[in-house]
Image: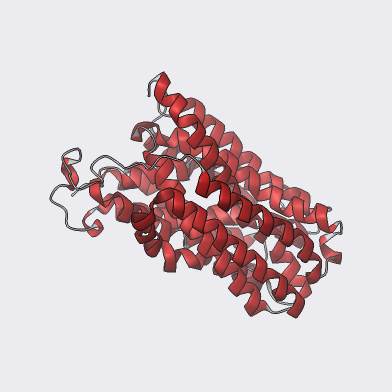
Amino acid sequence: MNQTSKKSYLLPLIIVGIMFFAIGFALGINSYLIPLLSKALNISSGQSYLVLAATFSAFLIFGYPASLVIGKIGYKNTMALSFLMFATGFYLFIPSARLGSLPLFLFASFISGMGNAFLQASVNPYITILGPIESAAKRMSIMGIANKLAWPIAPLFLSLVISKNVKDVQLTDINLPFYIIIGVFILLGVLAYFSPLPEVAAAGEEDSTEDCAYAADKKSIWEFPHLLLGGLTLFLYVGVETISLGTLVDYATSINLPNPGLYAWIAPVGMVIGYICGVIFIPKHLSQAKALLICAIVALIGSLMVVFVTESLSIWFISLMALGCSLMWPALWPLAIADLGRFTKAGSSLLVIAIVGGALVPTIYGFLKDAYGAQHAYWVAVPCFLFILYYALSGHKIRK
């Protein structure tokens, strides 16, 4: 990328970085809601984690329609539309709290998840193809820093505005912070609509496939094995990353640690360290595939340490899981959509659908927690990281 190109990409990077922050903030709200709902509604951990399931299940339903919308109105307008969906979902949390209704909370989470699905479907491929594919992981790492720092800011913001210990919070106490959040997200939607974001396209994405010979004779995305395996890998990765980010406050509460809300920072700090490494080393010193391999090994070690050491120490090893997860998204996405040509948008929508892993894997964690205890529930991460290790070693290379 020459100096002129860097300058032209700087403003789009900043704007999209704000959107990645918004995604992380919206998902981080669940970290606060899960223990709150468990206490206020007197439900099990498995049931409280259905809030995450409702949020991420929207990706399964709206992942492909989002790609169709992008094709019709473009990336920028889809980003603006997604913020209005977010605001609608956040508004529904207010009557959900007043009525104390779990089904309404799940519906509100689902609508919020719909906004997340449309925003993820637009910003991830956008940032991937905004510049050279070999440096996509670097750009994704920069976005990841903005995204993961927002996760702990959400429960911290809620705690500060509500000004109560989590154990003393009533459901209706969330009204004021959610009104503020709604206003901010509507403003972000307006800013996205009027932002100077250029429309972009991947090599061969338009009518011609001359720049992508591998895709020239393909009829559909189902003929790209590296994409299909990448989708499954992404499914598992989002699940375990959501566990590392979304269970900290609940886990700290379960093992009776003081000020459990403060532990929400453990995983994001680990991830930001990983993202900084990605910005420094990719692609000059480290390929995207090698970064994925190293991260899979680190995350696997971290998950095993979480389940084997004592409870009071185990929570700190979740940061090692998170460190391993850090470069998985930046590396997985470009590896999976490489060589798709005119199928780039459709392939990206498949990967967005795979984000539904954030619905299934944490829900399994929640029910394992009910059955075997909070610490042993982290065993669910081990087979997930093993499959990610396989994709890093050979799965992404398959081109037949």
Looking at the rendered image, the quarter that the N terminus falls into is top left
> Which of the 4 quarters of the picture holds residue 43?
bottom right
- Asked whether 287 or 143 is in front, the reply is 143
Residue shown at 81%/55% (left/top)?
A: 161
Q: Residue 368's image quarter? A: bottom right
* Up-down relation of residue 208 to residue 94 (above or below): above
Where 38 sits versus 299, above or below? below
Residue at image x 67%, y 63%? 374
Residue 131 is situated, as x and y percent measured from the top left of the image, at 38, 33
Pick out the residue farthest to the top: 3
Residue 324's spot in the image, x, y percent? 53, 42
Q: How many labels sit on residues?
A: 0
The colour scheme used to paint the residues is secondary structure
Residue 326 higher or lower than 366, as above or below: above
* Front residue (pair 231, 54): 54
Would residue 182 be found to the left or right of residue 135 on screen? right
- Between 176 and 158, the residue placed more toward the observer is 176
Q: Position of residue 140 (x, y in %)?
A: 47, 39
- Is residue 43 something that shows in the picture? yes
Task: Name the residue rendered at 53%, 30% in the picture.
Answer: 277
